Image (cartoon, rainbow, N blue to C red):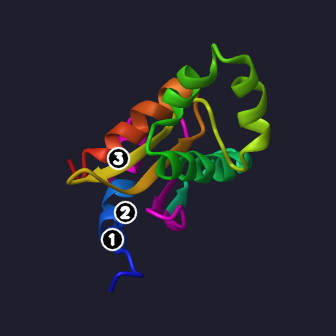
Amino acid sequence: MKYVTQNPSITHAAARAIIDAAVEAAGETSIAYAIAVVDAAGHLTAFIRMDGAPVMAAQVAQDKAYTAAGFGMSTEQWHEFIKDDAPLALGAPTGVDRLVAFGGGIPITVDGHIVGGIGVSGGHWSDDIKIAGAGMTAIN
């Protein structure tokens, strides 16, 4: 099958486990979050918007997950990647659809393959990173 590739992707069960671990960690805070997990192609696989989470957090969480899966680097790393490159800093956030360049999105890798991404939104981006990291403990 020389014209076909096989790309590993996260299972729904793993995505749910990640969401559950993130929700558990979020429950230890006073912040309500939106948490999204996408597959390797960036398609939404599991999602929750906790009671009281900002409405816009739903879209931001999904876009953070999409960014992390699509580029294989955290959204926090995107900020570092573009901050000292004026043309990239000006063009990437507005020119690349759904790109988020602040913390809260982490690629999900298994055996060296990017199989998806998690995105968290609702708190300060530094809090979002912590909740996303807690979610990742479900499969690491």
For residue 7, what is the image quadrant?
bottom left
Vertical placement of residue 37 versus 129, above or below = below
Q: Which of marks 1 and 3 is in front?
A: 1
Tell me the kind of residue under disc 1: Thr
Q: Which quadrant: the N terminus?
A: bottom left
Tell me the kind of residue under disc 2: Ala
Read off the residue under disc 2: 15
Q: Which of marks 1 and 2 is in front?
A: 1
Tell me the CA gap for discs 1 and 3: 15 Å
Which percent across, then down, holds residue 34?
56, 49
Span shown in magenta: 21-46
- Secondary structure of the residue carrying tag 2 is helix
Tell me the CA gap for discs 1 and 2: 6 Å
Read off the residue under disc 3: 135
Q: Which mark is residue 139?
A: none
Q: Nearer the viewer, residue 56 or 119?
A: 119
